[in-house]
Image (cartoon, helix red, strand yellow):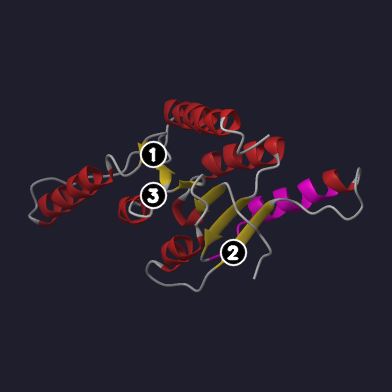
Amino acid sequence: MPEFKSPILWVDSDSCPVQIRSIILKAAIRLDLETVFVSDRELKDVKTARSEHTAMLRKVDPDAVSSIFYVVVPTGADSADDYIVENADNPDALVITRDVPLSSRLASKGLVCLDDRGRIIDWSNAANRLSQRDANYQLREAGVFDERNDRISERNIREFSASLDRHLNMLKKKGVIK
């Protein structure tokens, strides 16, 4: 079990695009944020970033360890989601996920989520997002339309990055992060 204390960022990494993980990793290193990536497989970019961050910190303090963690959960439906719901308990935490049901579960705990397109999901809009998702699912099942997730665009990446920065700046103003 990783030895994290009160993570600021939680990442549902199973479906998180590499470009988005890169932005999260850069912010985690720049601000030394306790960040936890959860997936059902090891992610090479996260493992490498943790090692490089630890090496950088040890230039100043030989006992320092990176604030970036990764948790590999058993493969299975919702195993990463369940882990995050059970363990994300810092009220100031931000969870990054594109999973609408997970966002809804976390919003019911009072947490804020950010999807990979930069949209915030919280108690004020989670039920609506879940209803939209369920309605779209029913329409797809009825053959009315075939919804496809578009590939992440440069614009989506910029919007995510800007939204993450806004949220982190808000946490700075609150004194939650340095």
Quadrant of residue 147 in the image? top left
Q: Check the image and report above or below for 150 versus 13.
A: above
Given residues 169 and 18, the one toward you in this image is 169
Q: Which residue is mark 2?
A: 71
3 vs 2, front mark: 3
Q: Amino acid at mark 2?
A: Val
Please state the extent of the stretch shown in magenta in the rendering. Answer: 41-55
- The N terminus sits in image quarter: bottom right
Q: CA distance from mark 2 to mark 1?
A: 26 Å
What kind of residue is marked 3? Gly
Q: Earlier in the sequence, mark 2 or mark 1?
A: 2
Verify CB contact (< 8 Å) between mark 3 and mark 2: no
| Residue 41 % position (x, y) | 55, 65
Q: Position of residue 101 (x, y in %)?
A: 30, 55
Pinpoint residue 50: horizontal percent, then vertical percent: 72, 52
Query: What is the quadrant of residue 30 in the picture?
Result: top right
Q: Judging from the image, what secondary structure is the residue with disc 2 in?
A: strand
Q: Secondary structure at mark 3?
A: loop
Which amino acid, mark 1?
Arg
Q: Is residue 88 magenta?
A: no
Which of pointers 3 and 1 lies earlier in the amino acid sequence? 3
Q: Which residue is mark 1?
A: 151
The residue pinned by badge 3 equals: 110
| Residue in the foreground of this view, choosing between 46 and 9 | 9
What residue appears at the point 65 percent right and 49 percent down from the top-left corner? 34
